[in-house]
């Protein structure tokens, strides 16, 4: 699978779970459901803090749309 196969979606953090996993609400255009997302390695490396209510960019694979990776925090 290449980088072109990833789906990038903007979502809002709803809940913080243990071990840097978050529940992210996806907009209605992409189903409008809540997924579990983890922080990407660069965000961990640079100590980017995330709290509930933050808007984030999430990468999803076409194989499993219930899990994702948070790659960017919008201001």
Image (spheres, grey):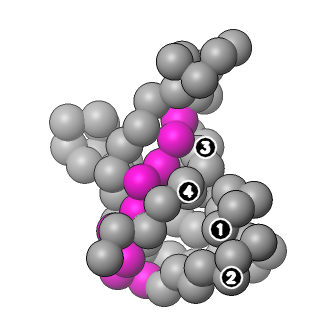
The label on residue 70 is 4
Q: Is residue 18 left or right of residue 32?
A: right
Query: Residue at horizontal 65%, vertical 16%?
Result: 2
For the record, the magenta segment spans 52-60
Measuring from the top left, give residue 72's x and y in whole percent.
48, 60
* Of the pair 34 and 6, the residue shown nearer to us: 6
Q: Specify whether residue 51 is painted magenta.
A: no
Residue that numbered label 1 is attached to: 43
Q: Which of the two labelled residues, at mark 4 and mark 1, occupies the earlier sequence position?
A: 1
Is tag 3's residue or tag 1's residue first in the polypeptide sequence?
A: 1
Residue 1 visible, this angle: yes
State the CA–CA distance, disc 4 to disc 3. 10 Å
- For the stretch drawn in magenta, the main secondary structure is strand
Which numbered dot is residue 67?
3
Spatial separation of the CA atoms under disc 2 and disc 1: 6 Å
Q: Earlier in the sequence, mark 2 or mark 4?
A: 2
Q: Are there few (<14), some (14-19), or many (20+) residues within 10 Å of tag 2?
A: few
Residue 66 spot, x, y in % from top left: 55, 40
Pointers 4 and 1 in contact (C-beta within 8 Å)? yes
Q: Point out the frontmost of discs 4 and 1.
A: 1
């Amino acid at each position: 699978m290449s980088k072109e196969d990833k789906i990038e979606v903007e979502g809002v953090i709803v809940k913080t779970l243990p071990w840097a996993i978050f529940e992210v609400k996806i907009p209605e255009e992409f189903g409008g459901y809540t997924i579990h997302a983890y922080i990407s390695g660069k965000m961990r490396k640079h100590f980017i803090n995330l709290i509930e209510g933050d808007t984030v960019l999430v990468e999803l694979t076409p194989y499993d749309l219930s899990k994702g990776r948070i790659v960017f925090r919008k201001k």
